[in-house]
Amino acid sequence: MKKQSKIAQIAIFFAIMLVLHLLSSVIFNLLPVPIKPTIIHIPIIIASILYGPQVGMVLGFLMGCISVITNTIVLIPSSYLFLALFVPNGNLHSLMIAMVPRILIGLTPYLVYKVLHNKLGLAIAGAVGSATNTIFVLGGIFFLFSNVYQGSIQAMLAVVLSANSICRVTYFGSLDNNYRPCT
C-alpha cells in the first residue's frame, strides 16, 4: 500500500475514533462510575485486520494520545492512571498504561487473523483485540498502582473485570446459529 493511502486510511479511522469518543463520552459521563468504558478500540481492530499492523499500531498510539488528552482536560478520581503529570499519584507508569496496551490493540488482531484467515478468525481477532486492551490496561493498573488508595483500587478492578467478563461471555455465548435478536 502506498504511503499516501496509509495516511488517508489512518485519517479516516482516526476521524471515526474521535466521533465514537465524543459520543461515548457524553453517554458514559452520565454514569456515576470512576472508570469509563471505551468503544474507540473497535476501529483500531478493524483497521488492523484490513490494512495491517502498521496502520493499527498508529491508530492505537492515537487512541493512547486521546486517553492522555482526555484525562488532562477532564480530571476524575482515576485520571492519574492515564496521565503522568499534574495529578497526585501520576507517574511514568501512567503513560505506559495509556499507550502500550492501545498500541498492542493494533497488532494482536492482525496476528490472530493472519493465523486464522476465515470468519471464525475474524471473530477471534476482534475478541483478542478487545481483550488486549482490557487485560493490559486493567492488569497494568492492578500491578503498577495497587498501593494507591490503600489497595482499594484492586477491589474496584475486580468488580470492573468481573462485569466485563460476564458481558463478554454472555455476548459470545449468544453467537450460535440459533440466536435470534429480539425484535
Image (cartoon, rainbow, N blue to C red):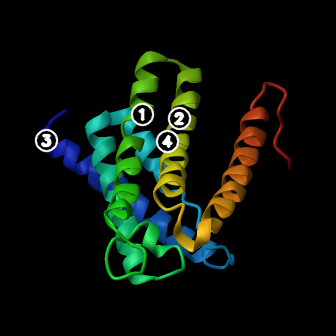
Q: Secondary structure at mark 4?
A: helix
x then y, percent, for residue 107:
36, 36
Q: Residue at x 42, y 80 (%)?
A: 88
Q: Which residue is mark 2?
A: 128
Which amino acid, by three-letter code, is at mark 3? Lys
Q: Residue at x 44, y 40 (%)?
A: 46
Gap between marks 3 and 2 measured at Cα:
28 Å
Are the residues at dot 2 and dot 1 in contact (C-beta closer than 8 Å)? yes
Which amino acid, by three-letter code, is at mark 1? Thr
Q: Secondary structure at mark 3?
A: helix
Q: Which residue is mark 4?
A: 132
> Seen in the image, is 179 located left or right of residue 153?
right
Are the residues at dot 4 and dot 3 in contact (C-beta closer than 8 Å)? no
Q: Which residue is mark 3?
A: 3
Q: Secondary structure at mark 1?
A: helix
Q: Where, quadrant-wise, is the N terminus in this rendering?
A: top left
N-terminal-most mark, 3 or 1: 3
- Between 35 and 167, which is closer to the camera in this rendering? 35
N-terminal-most mark, 3 or 2: 3
Gap between marks 3 and 1 measured at Cα:
22 Å
Q: Residue at x 39, y 81 (%)?
A: 87
Which amino acid, by three-letter code, is at mark 4? Thr
N-terminal-most mark, 4 or 1: 1
